[in-house]
Amino acid sequence: MTAKSAAAAARATVYGYPRQGAGRELKKAIEGYWKGRVTAEALKETATELRRSTWQRLAAAGVHEVPTGDFSYYDHVLDTSVMVGAVPRRHRSAVDADALDGYFAMARGTQDVAPLEMTKWFDTNYHYLVPELGPDTVFSADSTKQVAELKEALALGLAARPVLVGPVTYLLLAKPAPGVAADFEPLTLLDRLLPVYASVLADLRAAGAEWVQLDEPALVQDRTAADLNAAERAYRDLGALTDRPKLLVASYFDRLGDALPVLAKAPIDGLALDFTDAAAANLDALAAVGGLPGKRLVAGVVNGRNIWINDLEKSLATLGTLLGLADRVDVAASCSLLHVPIDAAAERDIDPQILRWLAFAQQKTGEIVTLAKGLAQGTDTIAAELAANRADLASRAGSAITHDPAVRARAAAVTDADGRRSQPYTERATAQRAHLGLPLLPTTTIGSFPQTTELRAARADLRAGRIDTAGYEQRIENEIREVISFQEKTGIDVLVHGEPERNDMVQYFAEQLTGYLATQHGWVQSYGTRYVRPPVLAGDISRPEPMTVRWTSYANSLTERPVKGMLTGPVTMLAWSFVRDDQPLGDTARQVALALRDEVNDLEEAGTSVIQVDEPALRETLPLRSADRPAYLDWATESFRLTTSGVRPDTQIHTHMCYAEFGDIVQAIDDLDADVISLEAARSHMQVARELAEHGYPREAGPGVYDIHSPRVPSADEAAALLRKGLEAIPAERLWVNPDCGLKTRGWPETRASLENLVAAARTVRGELSAS
């Protein structure tokens, strides 16, 4: 096909869409089902309606081929485990008894059975359920969900493309099941898994699928020769099947690198590649291998992970370059639109001028359709859209919100000394132990306590004017008193105020910093039914006034025990926001760090001796390619130290991280120079404690002994057993006892019981240590 005919054939598509519904109907239905208020049939009806409305919205916007199979009750990787029969042994009876309840048991656990491990989906804030595999894993095909959703779309008269997690990525994301040797490589199961994929593909073909998309984002990471060989073998075998639909292999989040020539040569029918800034090298690499003659190329030229409008003319230039490199060039976002909110037009409180700069899933869909039209029919047909886009881009570039000279001058004046504590850790530790007087194996929590219905109602009442500020603050004081009282009675050593005034650990701060914008309806799935509203980091950042000092000081006034001041760190403030794309991330991080440094210093001045600056996103934001990591880690660790290094030696700085592969960043954790770090460890069975020990980590650490993302209450014996595992790696004088993460999403009954058991476990193990 000539470049001209390839352009004429260009169509619009997407890889996936937000699942929750405009009013988070899916979240409400699922949580209602868990509480027994919604029947399984009603939940399924809600899901069916959400899928139908999404597909019809996409088709009405001009999308030529809608995705199916991307919808999930909890997680698409868990759906894949169900599809290939990889149900852990401990969950099989639950799945056999009731498929839906068994599915949720794998995701959330039960009182008697632990859930699957959860971690971040590449470098996003979406969490997936980690497959558990071993040498004895027997795969079996179950295409029920995938076929049913395809048939739903086809019945609406739509062209539909099922989307599956590819077999290589699925195995590379998996871990050895409990009891399996740690050095077991799930990728060795590829030959056992491929026939299952072949069966699913045949079922989809029989159900009417012309194309099936197989997502292989793991191939944009650094891959070994064995990994690349597995990819070559997988798509050689799947491509050779006679009873299959056409295969579109998709990659996203970064450049494909050495895997691109492997996939380009494979007997598949198309490739979907990311062509946004993070993966611009894909264009040159595609040209270097001679393109995709006779194949389909889906070009991801619209950023699917951020919320800024696309530069349409720049994207059209990229698309024009791609013509001639494939038999057909289609237009898409760089990845699933799962990672952005649904519709910017729903935002009523954002300045209309600024709203012009924003594109959520619905607006991105419109950009994709516009680009496909311009590519297929010529730019004259989209002249009005191009003119409006130029004006909107110019409006943002020239806005005063994006440039504050005072903020930039302060950031430019930072020196290396500003990012270093005045004394080394060993001297600080001595001063802190004398000042705080904590016992061996001190107990604490990560920061938040349950956000009750009453607390959420109080915030809603304040916004609606049903109560005044004084009435709201009285409710917050009452909650803090209850939280402090509970912790004292339970015997926790370092207390927290519980954060009842905070809506979200990033949004709360963003609403008090200049340069940030808050949304009202910008919900994005983090995991399961947990949705967040990432703020928009639109301009230069400063702190007009203290943000946390009042409530921390109030909590301090209620107890003789130390109370932690709680802040969110600069990297996480970026990672869990929609960050500006018009300057380097390191520059933005430094601005945020300086604002937070002012807050840390004010907390110390107000009498707070323990200050925690959470950085759960440090690993999440790590670039997928190792060559890109040193530069990132330099500015990421510098920004944390800049935040925390202005305090006295006897002020103890904590940090916290959760649900990530920490082994990749142990040196960076060390470079933060925090006095204490708490980390998720319960689901991963203290793996991080061993990683810290292998590194020779010299400071104090609290690997979690209570999995807060499950409703089950761990017994004191269970917590003590995990604590003993932690002691195998970390000396008692440097080991803390704490949950995996904050308790915001838990209910009070389970929180009380779990923390009482945690304290009892610490006392038991202290007694064992003193007796030995």
Image (tube, rainbow, N blue to C red):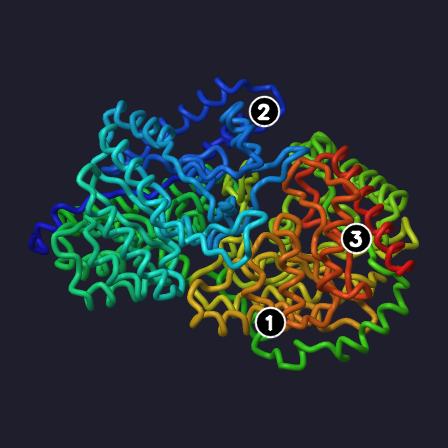
Q: Is mark 3 on a helix, strand or loop?
A: loop
Q: In which quarter of the image is the C terminus?
A: bottom right
Between 182 and 483, the one nearer to me in the picture: 182
| Residue at (41% x, 44% y) in the render | 360
| Count of picture labels | 3
Q: Earlier in the sequence, mark 2 or mark 1?
A: 2
| Residue 116 higher or lower than 322, as above or below | above
Q: Where is residue 318 shown, x and y percent of the image?
A: 23, 60
Between 657 and 514, the one nearer to me in the picture: 657
Distance from Cα at disc 2 to Cα at disc 1:
43 Å
Answer whether residue 107 is visible to the viewer in this image: yes
Farthest residue to the front: give it: 136
Q: Dot 2 surroundings within 10 Å: few (below 14), some, or many (20 or more)?
A: some
Classify residue 21 by image quadrant: top left
The residue that mark 1 highlights is 667
At label 2, the amino acid type is Gly
The residue that mark 3 highlights is 444
Q: Dot 1 surroundings within 10 Å: few (below 14), some, or many (20 or more)?
A: some
At label 3, the amino acid type is Thr
Q: Where is residue 197 shown, x and y percent of the image?
A: 32, 41
